[in-house]
């Protein structure tokens, strides 16, 4: 009791803590970060699209670049097709305008031909279809012909029939011979002009042509006229 006394040490801030305590807010923050990372990992593995590997990313980029290049090519092709389409439409408009002009020209020519046909002397043989004018020209083995048919009076509708030529002349041996051409279909309104070329037999020299207008092949005669061949 009366032994040696021990010195008493006074601490300024009271008793020191024996260990370090982590603040509660830091613990909550760390728990929140861990929970968020775990939730993100769970969503990534189970619900979100799988992460691409480096090779898959490279392949995806290559596929995108190829698709973009193809898109650029298709865009250029579309521009070229559009340009050609515009040119074709412009040509079509020009052709339509030219066709309208041609139709007007044809109508004027038809009206002029109608006047000429009516002014020509009538066919002395008469008939339902008159041969108002005809011209024949033999050139080697070909026969060039032009024929103008005419119907007198009011015409309700075209008259269908055939035209056939009977050619009289000399054969290559000098003997008289006759050649009959194939029937040609014709539809005569007020008037109808025929023209073209027909082949002739070798050595045949026609001198006279008879124009026969029939209602059908080997049918009834509607009109006839005899003309000389040049």
Image (spheres, grey):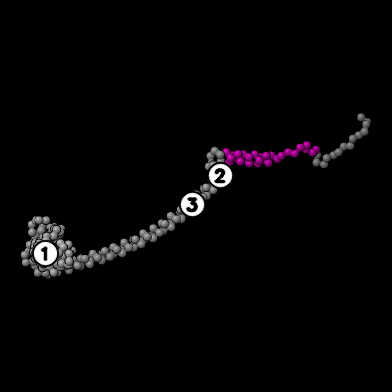
Q: Tell which of 228 and 56 is nearer to you.
A: 228
Measuring from the top left, give residue 32's x and y in whole percent.
Answer: 63, 40
Tell me the crowding category of disc 3: few under 14, some 14 to 19, or many 20 or more residues within 10 angstroms, Cα based. few
Q: Which mark is residue 119?
A: none
Dot 2 and dot 1 residues touching (CB under 8 Å): no
Residue carrying label 2: 53
Q: Residue furthest top?
A: 1
Residue carrying label 3: 66
Judging from the image, what secondary structure is the residue with disc 3 in?
helix
Measuring from the top left, give residue 156's x and y in whole percent.
Answer: 12, 59
Which residue sits at x=56%, y=41%?
Answer: 44
Which residue sits at x=28%, y=64%?
Answer: 97
Mark-to-mark CA distance, 1 and 3? 82 Å
Q: Is any atom of residue 47 visible in this view?
A: yes
Of helix, strand and loop, which mostly describes the magenta segment? helix
Q: Earlier in the sequence, mark 3 or mark 2?
A: 2
Taking the magenta stretch, the answer to whether it contains residue 117 is no
Tell me the crowding category of disc 2: few under 14, some 14 to 19, or many 20 or more residues within 10 angstroms, Cα based. few
Q: Residue furthest front?
A: 173
Q: Tell which of 67 and 179 is nearer to you.
A: 179
> Which image quadrant for residue 143?
bottom left
Relative to 69, is 207 above or below? Answer: below
Residue carrying label 1: 173
Measuring from the top left, give residue 9's x and y in whole percent.
Answer: 86, 38
Instruction: Quadrant for the C terminus, please.
Output: bottom left
Mark-to-mark CA distance, 2 and 1? 99 Å
Measuring from the top left, give residue 141's x and y in whole percent.
Answer: 17, 64
Which residue sits at x=31%, y=61%?
Answer: 92
- Highlighted range, magenta: 15-42
Q: Earlier in the sequence, mark 2 or mark 1?
A: 2
Mark-to-mark CA distance, 3 and 2? 20 Å
Of discs 1 and 3, which sits in the foreground?
1
């Amino acid at each position: 009791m009366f032994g040696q006394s021990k010195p008493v040490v006074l601490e300024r801030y009271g008793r020191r803590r024996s260990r370090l305590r982590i603040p509660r807010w830091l613990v909550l923050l760390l728990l929140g970060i861990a929970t968020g990372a775990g939730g993100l990992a769970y969503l990534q593995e189970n619900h979100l699209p799988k992460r691409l590997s480096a090779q898959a990313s490279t392949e995806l980029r290559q596929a995108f670049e190829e698709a973009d290049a193809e898109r650029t090519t298709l865009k250029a092709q579309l521009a070229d097709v559009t340009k050609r389409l515009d040119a074709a439409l412009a040509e079509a408009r020009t052709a339509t305008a030219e066709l309208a002009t041609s139709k007007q020209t044809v109508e004027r020519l038809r009206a002029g031909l109608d006047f000429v046909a009516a002014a020509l002397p009538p066919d002395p043989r008469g008939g339902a279809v008159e041969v108002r004018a005809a011209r024949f020209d033999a050139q080697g083995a070909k026969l060039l012909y032009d024929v103008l048919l005419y119907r007198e009076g009011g015409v309700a509708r075209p008259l269908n029939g055939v035209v056939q030529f009977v050619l009289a002349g000399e054969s290559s041996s000098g003997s008289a011979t006759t050649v009959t051409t194939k029937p040609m279909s014709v539809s005569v309104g007020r008037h109808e002009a025929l023209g073209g070329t027909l082949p002739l037999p070798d050595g045949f020299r026609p001198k006279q042509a008879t124009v026969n207008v029939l209602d059908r092949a080997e049918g009834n005669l509607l009109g006839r006229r005899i003309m000389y061949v040049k």
